[in-house]
Amino acid sequence: MAAIPSNSIDIAERLRFITCAACGVAFAVPMSLHTARAAERGEIWCPNGHASKLGPIDASNLTIQNLELLEELKNAREELHRAQRVAATATARVAEIATDDEVKRRCRLLSARAERTTFGRIACTVCGRSSNTESSLRNHLFRAHKEDVRAMNAEAFE
């Protein structure tokens, strides 16, 4: 079996991504080279030949950035917890109204509120199918649109 040529290389070294200030080209250099050049205030060249002077890493600047990132993380976690509480409340509401008896009650209310069409027929509010009587519409709603009725806002039926 012949080996299949690959267009990739596996490396076991961390890379630092840099964007050239002169031309905007993004490129990567080994982290060890970046750290060494930064310590000696050396230069790194982009693929287009522009030199970038590196200085030592400013610890106070990193601290400010870390504090900002921690604040963003804290806000994101709070937002996530709020969303989880809202979802839990919504799930609890759905669980409360998910009984078949409640759906039957809703179907009864919907059929009583349904508008009459031509020749005295009653139209389904979900699909538009017409029925002769409220009871046939109620049965249609319960059989064909049970999940639609279950998902309707409970406040509409109070």
Image (cartoon, grey):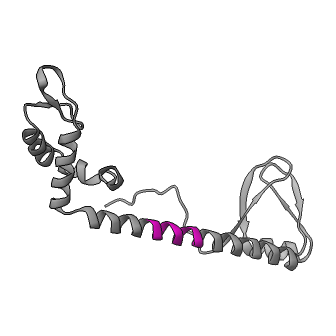
Q: Residue furthest top?
A: 118
Residue 101, position as x, y percentages in the image: 15, 60
Q: Is residue 85 magenta?
A: yes
Q: Residue at x 15, y 31 (%)?
A: 122
Residues in magenta, as a range: 77-86
Q: Is residue 12 magenta?
A: no
| In this view, 156 is above or below 37 | above
- Does residue 123 appear left or right of residue 33 in this picture? left
Q: Residue at x 18, y 50 (%)?
A: 146
- Does residue 66 appear left or right of residue 82 in this picture? right
Q: Residue at x 11, y 42 (%)?
A: 140
Q: Quadrant of residue 57?
A: bottom right
Residue toward you, 109 or 22? 109
| In this view, 17 is above or below 64 | above
Residue toward you, 149 or 48? 149
Quadrant including the C terminus: bottom left
Residue 49, position as x, y percentages in the image: 84, 51
Q: Main secondary structure of the magenta part?
A: helix
Residue toward you, 99 or 26? 99
Q: How many marks?
A: 0
Q: Quadrant of residue 95?
A: bottom left
Quadrant including the N terminus: bottom left
Residue 37, position as x, y percentages in the image: 85, 72
- Does residue 106 appear left or right of residue 89 in this picture? left
| In this view, 82 is above or below 142 | below
Residue 71, position as x, y percentages in the image: 71, 73
Residue toward you, 76 or 62? 76
Q: Residue at x 82, y 74 (%)?
A: 64
